[in-house]
Structure formats: structure tokens, C-alpha cells
Image (spheres, rainbow, N blue to C red):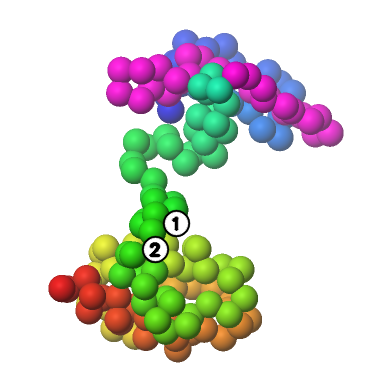
Amino acid sequence: MTSSPNLPAPHPHSFLIEARDVRKSFGQTPALRGASVSVSDGEILAIMGPSGSGKTTLLNAMSQMIDNGERIVTIEGLSPDGSHPVQRAWVAHQVPQCGYCQSGQIMAAAALLAKNRNPDDAQIDSYMTGIFRCGPDQRMRAAIHAAAQALKG
């Protein structure tokens, strides 16, 4: 996401959400060419357009999900068939109880193991943050250790 340096000063009105001159390309293909959006308190905004018109790209750019060009991996992209070592270990160790936070926790565990293939319990505890009402902490730790072993081959 880039912004033009020659834009006029922001309107003196204070917006809850404002994005000005949003531009985004995927390779040589432009997806957004100077989109601007502002939403004031009490307003409702609908972003409408045909498929491929840049609606999702605009919202993602505004939420800074794609502004740095890094690859974003979702739980669905980690392994479409559930075969990633973390996903397999989560099932084998029966980590989920309520399921509320499991996608995020699996992604956090995969990110931890991408950085550190052999974390100890203290590193796991500091990386896997949150208050887990269903009490999966011990199973989560065991699953991460098992996934680390599986990743080693």
C-alpha cells in the first residue's frame, strides 16, 4: 500500500476510519489505483463492486494485512488436507476442547516452529499467549514438542 506525497491536507473533520489514495499492485497488475474512503461516527459504509474490483484488497490494505508484501498464511493455507505436523499433533494430543481459539493457536505454533525447531517449555509458554478456559496448555505443549520432532524428519 502506498500513498501519494502530493495529496491535499486531511479534511479538518475527524473520521473514525480514513484511507486516502490507497494503491496496491500484485506484481505488474494494479488492484487499487488511488482509492479513498472515510467514515464518520454514526455512518455506515458499504463497499460494493463486481468480483475482482478490489473490495477485499482495499479492506485488507486498510487493516494493514497486505501492506508490507509479506506472504500471509491462514489456517486453510497451512495445509488444506490437515497434514501439517502441527495440525496432526493437535489431533493426536487432543488439544482442542472448545475450538474457539484453535485456528489461531495452531498458526502461532506453526510460526514458533518456523523460527525455532526445538523450543523448550518456557519458550512455548512465552510464545503461546492467551487465557485458555478449556485448559489445553499441557496438551498444547506436548503437541508442539511432537510437531517439532515430526518437522525434524
**Quadrant into which the C terminus falls:** bottom left
**Which image quarter: residue 135?**
bottom right
In the rendered image, which residue does mark 2 sit on? Answer: 82
Q: Cα distance, mark 1 to mark 2? A: 9 Å
Q: Which mark is residue 75?
A: 1
Q: Disc 1 on helix, strand or loop?
A: helix
Magenta span: 23-50
**Which image quarter: residue 39?**
top right
Disc 2 residue type?
A: Gly
Decide: few, some or many residues near mark 2? Use Cα within 10 Å; few <14, some 14-19, many ≥20. some
Image coords of residue 90 (percent x, y)? 42, 76
Image coords of residue 147 (percent x, y)? 30, 75
31 inside magenta stretch: yes
The structure residue drawn at horizontal position 67% and vertical position 25%, both measured from the top left corner, is 47
**Quadrant into which the N terminus falls:** top left
Is residue 89 toward the left or the right of residue 22 in the image? left
Image coords of residue 128 (percent x, y)? 44, 73
The structure residue drawn at horizontal position 68% and vertical position 18%, both measured from the top left corner, is 11
Q: Disc 2 on helix, strand or loop?
A: loop
